[in-house]
Amino acid sequence: MSKMVKKSFHAPDETRPIAKGKVEVVKLDDFQVIRNTFEPGWRWSESVKPIAKTDSCQVHHILYIISGRIAVRMDDGSTAEFGPGDVGIIPAGHDAWMVGDVPCVNLDFGGSTIYAKPTS
C-alpha cells in the first residue's frame, strides 16, 4: 500500500556540492527529486565532468526551470535554451551551461540518483 510522503528542500536529504553550484536531493521512498542551483559561469563540462568522469553528461533529465536560463548542446550538435517556466527532457549525451547573470534554479525528476555523484 502506498503512503503519503512530504519532504522539503529546506531540509534536503543530501547536498552534492559542485563548482559554481549545488545539487540538493530529496528522497521520496524509491523516487528522488533534485534541485539544482547553477551560479553564473557554471558549465557541466567544467563543474560536473570531473565528478562524472564521462565526456558528456550521461544522465537523462526531466527538468522544470524555476529561474535563470540554461543552454544545452547534445552530442549530435542540436541545441536548446531553457528559461523560467520551461519543462523539458534532456537525454543522456550533452553539455550544458548557464546563460546570463541570474542563477539557474531547476527541479530535475530524472537521473537524480547518479547526477553529480562520484562513481565508485
Image: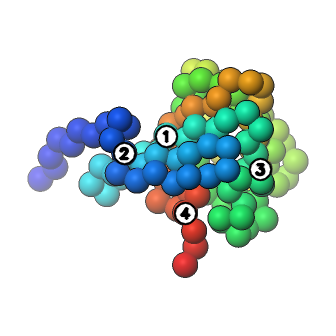
Q: How far separated are the C-alphas under marks 4 and 1?
A: 14 Å
Residue plotted at (71% across, 64% down): 50
* Along the line of sight, the residue nearer the viewer: 93 or 113: 113
Locate the C terminus and report the quarter of the image it occupies: bottom right
Q: Which residue is mark 3?
A: 95
Q: Earlier in the sequence, mark 2 or mark 1?
A: 2
Q: Identity of the amino acid at label 4?
A: Lys
Residue at the spot x=21%, y=43% of the render?
A: 5
Of callouts 2 and 4, which one flags the residue occurring earlier in the amino acid sequence?
Answer: 2
With 16 as the anchor, is 46 left or right in this view?
A: right
Q: Is residue 86 above or below residue 94?
A: above
- Residue annotated with mark 4: 117
Residue at 68% from the left image edge and 56% from the top image edge: 48
Point out the tag, 3 or 1, that comes first from the N-terminus: 1
Q: Which colouring convention does the figure follow?
A: rainbow
Which callout, 4 or 1, points at the residue further toward the start of the chain?
1
- Distance from Cα at disc 3 to Cα at disc 4: 17 Å
Mark 2 and mark 3 residues within 8 Å of each other at the beta carbon: no
In the rendered structure, which amino acid carries the disc numbered 1?
Arg
Tell me where residue 88 appears, x and y as whole percent.
61, 35
Q: Earlier in the sequence, mark 3 or mark 4?
A: 3
The three-letter code of the residue at mark 2 reads Pro
Q: CA distance from mark 2 to mark 3?
A: 26 Å
Q: Nearer the viewer, residue 83 or 79?
A: 83
The answer to whether marks 2 and 4 mark residues whose Cβ atoms lie closer than 8 Å is no
**Mark 1 lies on residue:** 35
